[in-house]
Image (cartoon, helix red, strand yellow):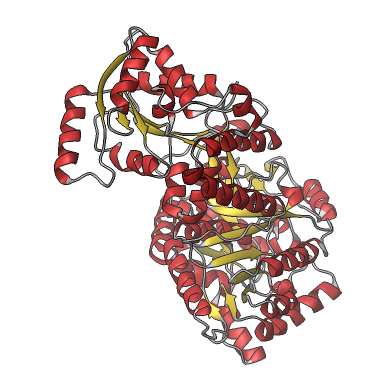
Amino acid sequence: MPDRNQRVDVLGVGVSALNLESAKKTILERLERRQKGYICVTGVHGVIEAQDDSRFRNILNESFLTTPDGMPMVWISWLRKHHEVDRVYGPDLMLEMAAATRDGKFTHFLYGGRPGIAELLQRRLEERYPGIRIVGTYTPPFGPLSADEERELRERFQRLKPDVTWVGLSTPKQERFMSDYLPKLDTTVMCGVGAAFDFHSKVVKQAPRWIQRSGFEWLYRTFQEPRRLFFRYLRNNTRFLWRYALSCVGLEPPRREEGVSIAFLGCRGVPARYSGFETLVEELGARLAERGHAVTVYNRAHFYPDRPREYRGMRIAYLPSLQTKSFETITHTLLAVIHAAVRKFDVVYLCGVGNSVLAGILKFRGSRVIVNVDGDDFRRLKWHPFARWWLKQSEEWATKLSNVVIADNRTVVDRYERDYGFRTTYLSYGAPERPAQAGKEALRKLGLKEGEYVLYAGRLTPENRPDLLIRAYEKVKGDWPCVVVGGAGYETEYGAELERMAGRRVKLVGPVYGEGYKELSLHCGVFVLPGIVEATRLVLLDQMGFGNAILYHDCAATWEVIGKAGMPFGPVNAETSLAEKLNELIGDPGKREAMRKAALERARDSYSWEKVADRYEAILDQLTAGKGLSRL
């Protein structure tokens, strides 16, 4: 049976993955629970209208159900492996629900049609389905309801309280009506069925079933009403075929009524699963999309086998890469740059200074380029000598080839000004909001007690220094376990060395994402950041937002972020210092509680994703207005 909560992305419209039988059952369940919601039945016409009208697209995507009304919606669902999907045609859904409710348990109201059509439809349905209870009809005016008409309608619904309201207007008028009036009217479910009023009242002849199943009902309707439908179908069908073909290769043009078109390149992709850049792209990209901008993220195909086409309002393009430590990022980004150059985005956001040499290609094609340099990447121990030289050289290329260079830490801002005479734009990140409640399933799986374990979360790489924590933990007293969350990726030898070092109290649990990561973070006793990286660490902001007692390896960049809300160890005799501070915190619950409150307060005061999005929007506005921002 279909998953009735699942949707198939069709050019930004989420079409429900269901068939007529599952749609009927879902609606009946909704009626039983008296849970309000509206249902859109949409095909090519609705999807194309949604390309030009972002509010209408939101209405379709926020519906209780948006059913596959046309065969192209069904065919696309089949291509996406949803073989159980079948057409849920508005007129068929109306008859199916009429048959299912002929026992009189649920009542109906007919809203729409030309004068006299709703009353005629009522008689036809009552003749065909004895026992059905249709409690009222209403033929609205051509334009919006006046204040008096709206008051009359509300009073009628308050008196009749119909369970199902069938809306027979044209698209997108009927969808707008349902979205606007469902909260105002005393009814449970609204369903927009368009021409069903004319078909079932026998005013307009319906296409034979074989034509409906063939996907050529639009041609049959054109012969019925050529003056009204010929140019509409010609325009909509042509645009749909063109846009869908482009979307299949990731070249779908930005939709109208959107702000700046912006592409994010250089990270692994969204949903965020790996590092700080992915979190930045997800949180920033989703907020920009919510504010009306056309956001595209280039994902590395091998990380996302399911390949959703859209996530949190962002469109996603998938491209391959050479899967080696040194060449994965640059090869994927090169393909993405070529792809993005063809599409000509207004702005391209390059994650990572190592990609900055490619900015020139994008600028040549007319895009404005933002490069986020992510700290002193060339100092990281995981890179071999050539890679470190490339990353250092890339810093200078970034200052010359991009429009804006973003640094997430003031220590990086100062170094660029000192080394290159270039003033980068300081812009940090946001911290998550601490949830009111969190589950404990991840703790149960690992045999952990709430508040009685030390946590590390991050990639298992030399510069992150999980080895330092593991060695120091041999000197920590008590029976608290040390939970190490993260994967080694291409650092297989280093990962194997950590496994050999780990004592009985150290749990190397591998990568943990989503709710599991939140649960382990929210319930830990102490979080440790053992590495020194001159950049703002997203995991640090996570832990501050979660309100944790944080122990960190003393360095200027981390101090800038956490201030007095955390406890530093080292930098001299770091291993011994870390063990001593862990013993101190484990033995002092009052100190841990004070640190938790301080971290949470600093995160709320200083690190807001909404404020970060505000700053980026200001940059986008200035870039697209043609102002140079290289020294903003």
In this orientation, which residue lies closer to the viewer: 477 or 340? 340
Is 632 situated above or below 534? below
Point out the image quarter for the N terminus.
Answer: top right
Is 157 situated left or right of 550 in this image? left
Residue 272 appears in the picture as rendered: no
Is 604 situated above or below 341? above
- Residue at x 31%, y 26% (from the top left corner): 118
| Quadrant in the rendering for residue 421 | bottom right
What percent of the width, then of the height, locates residue 517?
A: 58, 45
Is 551 situated left or right of 612 in this image? right
**Label total for image:** 0
In this orientation, which residue lies closer to the viewer: 64 or 437? 64
In this orientation, which residue lies closer to the viewer: 567 or 30? 30
Is 359 situated above or below 429? below
Is 571 situated above or below 132? below
Is 189 situated left or right of 79 in this image? left
| Quadrant in the rendering for residue 182 | top left
Residue 342 appears in the picture as rendered: yes
What percent of the width, then of the height, locates residue 324?
A: 84, 58
The furthest residue to the bottom: 421
- Residue at x 71%, y 85% (from the top left corner): 396
- Residue at x 66%, y 89% (from the top left corner): 419
| Quadrant in the rendering for residue 100 | top left
What percent of the width, then of the height, locates residue 568?
A: 55, 65
What percent of the width, then of the height, locates residue 454?
A: 58, 48
- Residue at x 56%, y 49% (from the top left corner): 236
